[in-house]
Image: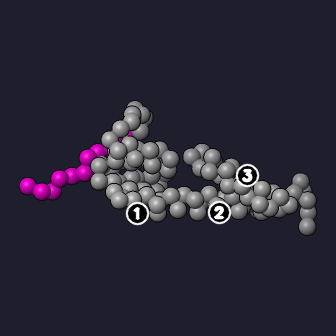
């Protein structure tokens, strides 16, 4: 096997800005568990761990007493909860907006979509 310095990756993975913190956290945790793994193996595992963390968070939010649904559609994250719905450019911002709407506190950024109240279908 070639040392990491001589390794030419076949696939390049770009880490979206909103996922970098989770990626680097996963990378550091994985490096502690497996200190002798190659850099390329470490990056692959960190990407997998970061994706799993995001999926676990989505599942956790969906099972709260007042459910929060977050889905990715293209480059946007759409969120919906009993208090409203909206969209954001990052998973973290969508989570913040949904929790803020649900709890009825906090502030909103001008550059992000504002939560909209759920439609009232009752007469």
Distance from disc 2 to disc 3, alpha carbons, whole Å, reads 14 Å
Task: Please name the residue shown 58% across and 63% down the image.
Answer: 52
Q: Residue at x 62, y 51 (%)?
A: 22
Q: Distance between the residues labelled 1 and 2?
A: 23 Å
In front: 85, or 11? 85
Locate residue 52 relative to residue 79 in the image: left or right: right
Front: mark 2 or 3: 3
Image quadrant of residue 61? bottom left
- Residue behind mark 1: 63
Q: Mark 2 points at which residue?
A: 48
Q: Does the magenta stretch include residue 48?
A: no
Q: Give the main secondary structure of the magenta stretch.
A: loop
Q: Which of 70 and 36 is in front in this view?
A: 36
State which region is magenta. Answer: 113-123
Residue 88 appears in view: no
Let me know if residue 115 is in the magenta part. yes
Residue 91 screen position, x and y as percent: 50, 50
Can you tell which mark lies on residue 28?
3
Q: 121 or 96: nearer the eye?
A: 96
In space, the residues marked 3 and 1 are separated at their CA atoms by 29 Å
| Dot placed on the residue nearer the N-terminal end, 2 or 3 | 3
Q: Quadrant for the C terminus, please.
A: bottom left
Q: Are there few (<14), some (14-19), or many (20+) residues within 10 Å of tag 2?
A: few
Residue 116: give x, y in percent of width and height. 29, 45
Badge 1 crowding class, 10 Å Cα cut-off, few under 14, some 14 to 19, many 20 or more, is: few
> Could you tell which of marks 1 and 2 lies nearer the N-terminus?
2
């Amino acid at each position: 096997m070639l040392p990491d310095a001589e390794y030419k990756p076949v696939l390049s993975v770009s880490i979206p800005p909103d996922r970098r913190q989770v990626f680097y956290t996963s990378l550091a945790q994985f490096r502690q568990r497996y200190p002798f793994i190659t850099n390329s193996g470490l990056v692959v595992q960190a990407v997998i761990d970061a994706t799993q963390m995001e999926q676990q968070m989505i599942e956790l939010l969906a099972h709260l007493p007042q459910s929060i649904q977050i889905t990715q559609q293209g480059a946007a994250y759409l969120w919906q909860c009993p208090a409203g719905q909206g969209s954001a450019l990052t998973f973290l911002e969508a989570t913040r907006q949904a929790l803020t709407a649900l709890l009825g506190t906090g502030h909103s950024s001008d550059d992000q979509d504002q939560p909209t109240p759920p439609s009232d279908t009752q007469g």
